[in-house]
Image (cartoon, grey):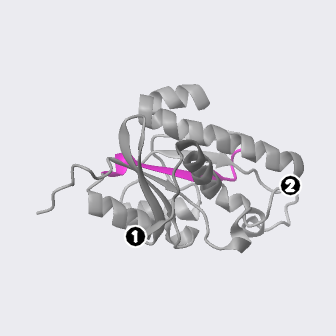
């Protein structure tokens, strides 16, 4: 039998992206951008390697939380999330995922209590590993390419520029605030404020 440590986290916040400098400023890495923004606000560094992710345990709004940036590449994000959730016996309802979304315009975010992957490979991986769609997520809009011949994979692995970059950076600020509000005031309050 396993017992959860009293000092262990009650929530996991998983920020999705791809490791490596070549992916650093890409649309697919806005989850990592949000992690860095939140870490800066909290005065912490997410750099302890555990469960195949950079992690940090801290308090947000009086709640003990594990922040994690999986280093398994987007399509295997679920491996890291599953290991941490299993280790600390955290149910899927308390695994909050921050991820990019091509269905949303740059500059917008959307909070969902649960749902399908919507074709997002990181969400697909987490759903498969947790065997559940019942986990909340904060989606950050990165839009879709204007030209139909543009491959979606090339788009999300591309780097936004100019006004688009500024819009996404603004959404990242909102996403970090949404994470804080979800943990402090609950999903309904955050959905009401940000959706």
Identify which residue, 56 or 93, lies in the foreground. 56
Q: SS at mark 1?
A: loop
User: Crowding at label 1, few (<14), some or many (≥20) Cα neighbours within 10 Å?
Assistant: some
Question: On the picture, is 139 further left or further right than 185?
Answer: right
> Does residue 83 appear in this view?
yes
Residue that appears at 73% across and 46% down: 169
| Residue of label 1 | 51
> Does residue 106 appear in this view?
no
Q: Quadrant of residue 122?
A: bottom right
Question: On the picture, is 65 further left or further right than 34?
Answer: left
Residue that appears at 77% across and 69% down: 154
Identify which residue, 153 or 169, lies in the foreground. 169
In the image, residue 42 sits, relative to residue 31, either above or below, namely above
| Residue of label 2 | 161
In the image, residue 185 sits, relative to residue 140, either above or below, namely above
Residue that appears at 55% across and 51% down: 98
Q: Which residues are magenta?
A: 91-105
Question: On the picture, is 163 further left or further right than 95?
Answer: right
């Amino acid at each position: 039998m396993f017992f959860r440590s009293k000092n262990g986290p009650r929530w996991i916040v998983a920020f999705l992206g791809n490791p490596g400098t070549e992916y650093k400023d890409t649309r697919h890495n806005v989850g990592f951008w949000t992690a860095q923004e939140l870490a800066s606000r909290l005065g912490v560094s997410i750099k302890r390697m555990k469960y195949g992710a950079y992690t940090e345990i801290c308090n947000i709004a009086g709640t003990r939380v594990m922040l994690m940036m999986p280093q398994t590449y987007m399509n295997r994000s679920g491996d890291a999330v599953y290991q941490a959730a299993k280790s600390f016996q955290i149910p899927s309802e308390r695994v909050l995922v921050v991820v990019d979304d091509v269905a949303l315009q740059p500059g917008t975010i959307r909070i969902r209590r649960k749902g399908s992957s919507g074709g997002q490979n990181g969400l697909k991986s987490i759903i498969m590993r947790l065997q559940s769609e019942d986990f909340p997520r904060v989606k950050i809009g990165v839009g879709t390419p204007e030209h139909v011949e543009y491959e979606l994979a090339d788009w999300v692995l591309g780097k936004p520029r100019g006004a688009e970059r500024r819009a996404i950076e603004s959404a990242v600020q909102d996403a970090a605030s949404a994470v804080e509000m979800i943990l402090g005031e609950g999903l309904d309050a955050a959905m009401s404020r940000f959706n």
